[in-house]
Amino acid sequence: MARTLSRAIAAAAIVIAVLSGALAGAPSATAAAPVASGNVAAAVHSSGFDAGYIISDDRFFDSNAMSEAQIQAFLNKMVPTCRATDPNLPCLKSLYTSTNTRAPDPAGRCSGYNSEGYETGARIIWRVAQACGISPQVIMVMLQKEQGLITSTKPDAWAYKAAMGADCPDTSACDTRYMNFFNQVYRAAWQMKEYTIHPNSWNHRVGWTSVRYHPEPSCGSSQVYIQNQATANLYNYTPYQPNDSALANMYGVGDACGAYGNRNFWRDFNAWFGASTVEGTTAINSLYASMGADSGPLGSPTTGMLKVTEGGGGTARAFVNGSIYWTSLTGAAAVLEPERSLYFQYSGAAGPLGWPNSQRLSITGPAGSGTGQSYTKASIYSSANGTFLVTGAMQQTYFARGGAAGYLGFPISAEIPFDGGTAQSFAQGTIYMQSNGWGGAVGASLVSAYAKSGGPGGPLGWPRSDTSSVAANGGGTGQAFEKGSLYGSSAGAFIVSGAIRDYYFTRGGSAGQLGWPTATAVCESATQCRQDFQNGTVYWTQTGGFRVGSPAIESYYLANSAALGARQSEAVRSTDNGGGFGQTFANGSVYSSAAGTFRVQGAVRDFYWRMNGSSGALGWPASEWNAGASGRPGSQTFQKGTLYYDGKSVYIGDPAIEQIWWSTGAAGGTLGQKTSGVIVIPQNGGGRGQAFQGGSVYASAAGAFAVSGGVLTTYFSLGGSAGALGWPTAAATCSNGTCVQTFQTGTITYSPSTGGIVTR
């Protein structure tokens, strides 16, 4: 099923004449589109020819290798100037000829052809390729090897009659039933599928087969291991392999036993369309179809199948909006924009990513959404923050933390070098990797403070853990580094290091007694430092070790150390009653709160402790001890009351009520002894009251006043300060046995004869 040998030699001469121009237009990875690293060579050397593997099945049966428009563009490119003068014998790029309707083949060789009347050469090639499942590139190379039609600038009548050499054996005349361009193309494609469907019915099969060098038997033959069906098809169509002389003169002729059909097929295919033995074509086409082909996200193809040798070798094809890559290990995977641009930036399969081994995936995590794609050596992620590569040890550390679906989220920067390692930022933190492979993630709550401190080159050094959350003491985050720890809470982010950190750890760290740091450590000298925490300040001296204090209490103590004596406890924080610090000394205790810093000592302290101290009913001290005027008890004011000490006992009093009591002569006066403590009464605006032997004293916003005698009896009958009259607003005035006293809502007038009369 091939033209005569003399025509083969003539076609070889035609190729020699036009090849330099044709190869200049051959597609390559860089000219057509940046598909993959490495280019398809324009010149073809015989060293690449394998008699048993001329073309892969994937490339041979790739019916979608080129669109009709691409076929037409290729024909135009191969013959820039046509010298044909006979309108019936134009150059192939301008051919417009009749076609015939063909019924579908019952055995499945071709699906049939519905004639459109007159059609262009490019359309015939494309439609036959679709009908018979043969690559249009294979058809065009066969048109070249048989009659030189692809590059002919002035084809003759025979070139079109026997365009594909179909049914034109070397030993007899051509079958006239197939003597025109359409019939030749359809018949040749049909025949190739016949070889495929019935491989055992033909002489050349997959496996060891004897292949002759020439129609002349004396030229001999050799055993060839035919590796695939496409190569067997070529030998069944043109049953000769090139001898050494034909291969030695790749663009010319060899000795008398040289045969050129299959050599020229291999040479021209590789020169025009890239490596003929490209595997993965079927997988690439299948993926392309599943993604919607031209109407899908990839758009139209911009190159044919390209063989890539880097990274272990594979196949690639470029499209308007991406590329598809295939290797025997990874299968076919599409790389879309913007990932493809970054992939090319890193040298494609030859670079640090290797081959794609997954499709693009949509990812949604706690830190946002985007896409990710895995490669054999790295991953690429795209989000609103950009498209970035994550590779090597950084990738492994990232994966261990859930990748883009984890708490770190998507990358927001490329990996950047540091002295001794690298770092890469993500939406919710930064991973720092030492060159020894040790890595840690600094979370968003601490990463800014860590960077401001100098990062790995600063006082903390490299991370030794990830950022972790602690709920205790109000909550926050912490992280260990080579030379210290970094903590972040509502108070801010602060470093704890050296001896203070060691001591801090013995107290449970941020979850312990001291809580979270609230300030940076301050060192007055190399042997004396302090650092503030929520629940105290750690003081360190080289000779004295550690103690926990409160700065306000420490200042007070230094001014009063002789009177207070030695420290007997650390400063302890309490959150009750508004919060503050307390510390015990030999001769008293010192409390510091929003009310100030004050000492509580002696019997008053004992009583105060019985009242649960700063956590109890009195709250925090609000004044120093007041010794009192001569003959009167001393007192100390607290948030919610006043303690009095008369040298014998301590009691809770109200200063305003006490003043009235003492002004009336105290226990020896008209009011006499106390018969109750101070009572808080909330009604009628609120106030305090206290009972005595000779009456009661009330203190409210109106002032402090005693109520006694018949007025008190009448007042009690009306509910007292919680009743209808409310609180007294003035002292009683008495004349001739009649007493009058005003209240919030009325007046009581009392005489022994009338009793109590209430005037509203």
Image: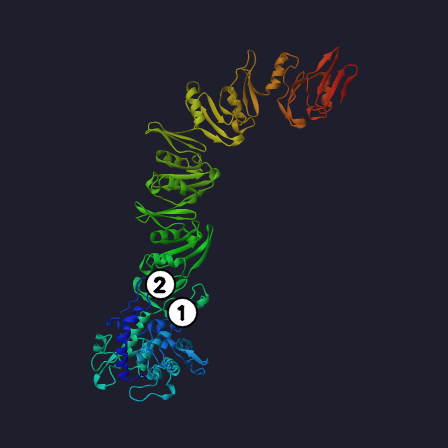
SS of the residue under disc 1: helix
Quadrant into which the C terminus falls: top right
- At horizontal 31% and vertical 60% (from top left) the residue drawn is 350
Q: How many numbered callouts?
A: 2
- Mark 1 and mark 2 lie on one chain; the one further toward the N terminus is 2
Does residue 351 appear left or right of residue 253 in this picture?
Answer: right
- Can you give x and y, in whole percent of width and height, for residue 166 in the image? 35, 83
Q: Which mark is residue 285?
A: 1
- Front in this rendered view, residue 175 or 54: 175
- Can you give x and y, in whole percent of width and height, for residue 489 in the image? 45, 38
SS of the residue under disc 2: loop
Specify few, some or many for label 2: CA neighbours under 10 Å numbering under 14, 14-19, or 20 or more: many
| Spatial CA span between label 1 and label 2 | 15 Å
Quadrant into which the N terminus falls: bottom left
Query: To which quarter of the image does residue 546 belong?
Result: top left
Q: Which mark is residue 559?
A: none
- The answer to whether one can see residue 225 in this image is no
- Can you give x and y, in whole percent of width and height, for residue 600 in the image? 49, 22
Does residue 569 appear left or right of residue 715 in this picture?
Answer: left
Does residue 612 appear left or right of residue 215 in this picture?
Answer: right
Query: To which quarter of the image does residue 740 belong?
Result: top right
What's the residue type where badge 2 is placed? Val
Specify few, some or many for label 1: CA neighbours under 10 Å numbering under 14, 14-19, or 20 or more: many
- Front in this rendered view, residue 228 or 551: 228
- Identify whether 712 is placed above or below 159: above
Q: Nearer the viewer, mark 1 or mark 2?
A: 2
Q: List the single residue furthest toward the front.
A: 85
- Identify whether 690 is placed above or below 196: above
Q: Are marks 1 and 2 in contact (CB under 8 Å)?
A: no
**Residue tagged by mark 2?**
35
- Front in this rendered view, residue 563 or 443: 443
What's the residue type where badge 1 is placed? Asn
